[in-house]
Image (cartoon, grey):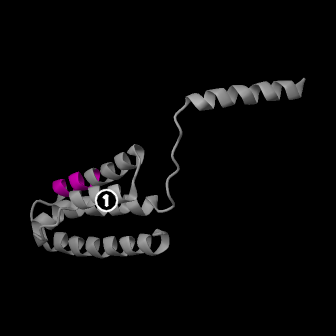
Amino acid sequence: MRAKIATSLSALLLCIGSQLPAQAIDPAYQPQMERLAEIMGALYHLDDLCLRSGVDWRGQLADLMDLDEVDDDRRARLAGAFNDNYADFQQSHSRCTDSASLLTSRFLDEGAKISYDIHIRYAE
């Protein structure tokens, strides 16, 4: 009797499971990608204030997401991390101060380290 119930339950779960959308599994480097997106969001604002390098940080993130072939869920989370940090830095820094300049430098260094780490550890 228990075997029959278990078999019926398994069949039911299989049917229900086939009706639900598949949940993507994040790659191991997703936390680093989200941090990189946050950094790029901050740099999108701070670069314009302090460096004026002309780097399109938003475009760079879009290119990175395209290269990584992220799904819609990951794309939304990465864009959200970028946009949230951009908004935070836009509110807290209206001109290039010593603090903003130092943050810009630190973010560039941290972003370079994260990018290098992802490439070395996970590139095919």
| Lateral position of residue 41 relative to residue 18, left or right | left
Quadrant containing the N terminus in the rendered view: top right
Q: Give SS at disc 1.
A: helix
Is 19 part of what is drawn in magenta? no
* Relative image position of residue 112 (x, y in whole percent): 32, 74
The residue lying at 22 percent from left, 55 percent from top is 86
| Residue 41 location (% of width, % of height) | 25, 58
Q: Report the front residue among 32 and 13.
A: 13
Q: Residue at x 48, y 69 (%)?
A: 124
Examine the image and state in which quarter residue 4 appears. Answer: top right
Q: Is residue 78 visible in this depiction of the protein?
A: yes
What x and y, as percent, mark residue 63? Answer: 28, 59
Q: Is residue 21 left or right of residue 8?
A: left
Q: Is residue 109 above or below residue 63?
A: below
Q: Which residue is depicted at the point 16% across and 66% down?
A: 55
User: As shown in the figure, which amino acid type bears the numbered disc 1?
Assistant: Glu
Quarter of the image for residue 59 reads bottom left
Using the image as rendered, state which of residue 102 and residue 3 is in the foreground: 3
Residue beneath disc 1: 38
Q: Which residues are magenta?
A: 84-91
Give the residue drawn at x 65%, y 27%: 15
